[in-house]
Image (cartoon, rainbow, N blue to C red):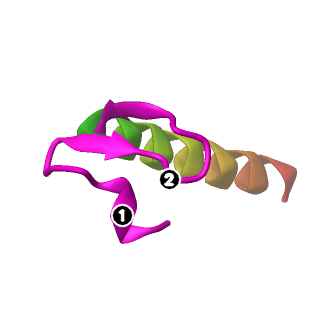
């Protein structure tokens, strides 16, 4: 992730595709996705 994606403390704009959202929402989504991956790995073991 590029530091340029954070336009302000609360703003996020992807420098690759232009996706824009609240930075906290983007962070929460990333944490959720990582948790789901870990859950799926644990279930597969």
- Callout 2 environment at 10 Å: few (<14), some (14 to 19), or many (20+)? some
Report the residue marked by disc 2: 15
Q: Can residue 9 be found in the magenta stretch? A: yes
Left or right of residue 4, residue 29 in this image: right
Q: Which residue appears farthest toward the right when viewing the image?
A: 44
Q: Position of residue 30 (x, y in %)?
A: 48, 46
Q: Residue at x 39, y 39 (%)?
A: 26
Which is nearer the eye, 44 or 7?
Answer: 7
Q: Observer-nearest residue: 3 or 37?
A: 3
Residue 27 to residue 38: above or below: above
Task: Give the numbered dot on residue 22.
Answer: none
Query: Residues under labels 2 and 1: Cα distance?
Result: 7 Å
- For label 2, the SS is loop
User: Mark 1: few, some, or many residues within 10 Å (few <14, many ≥20)?
Assistant: few
Residue at the spot 64% in from the left edge and 55% down from the top edge: 38
User: From the viewer's perspective, is residue 45 above or below residue 11?
Assistant: below
Nearest the camera: 36 or 2? 2
Q: Position of residue 25 (x, y in %)?
A: 32, 33
Q: Is residue 6 magenta?
A: yes
Q: Residue at the location (54% across, 48% down)?
A: 35
Q: Which residues are magenta?
A: 1-22
Residue 18 image offset from top left, x and y in percent: 52, 38
The residue that appears at 84% across and 59% down in the rendered structure is 45
Q: Are marks 2 and 1 in contact (CB under 8 Å)?
A: yes
In the displayed structure, does residue 30 sit left or right of residue 39?
left
Tag on residue 4? 1
């Amino acid at each position: 992730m590029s530091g340029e994606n954070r336009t302000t403390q609360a703003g996020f704009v992807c420098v690759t595709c232009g996706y824009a959202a609240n930075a906290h929402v983007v962070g929460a989504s990333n944490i959720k996705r990582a948790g789901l991956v870990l859950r799926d790995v644990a279930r597969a073991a």
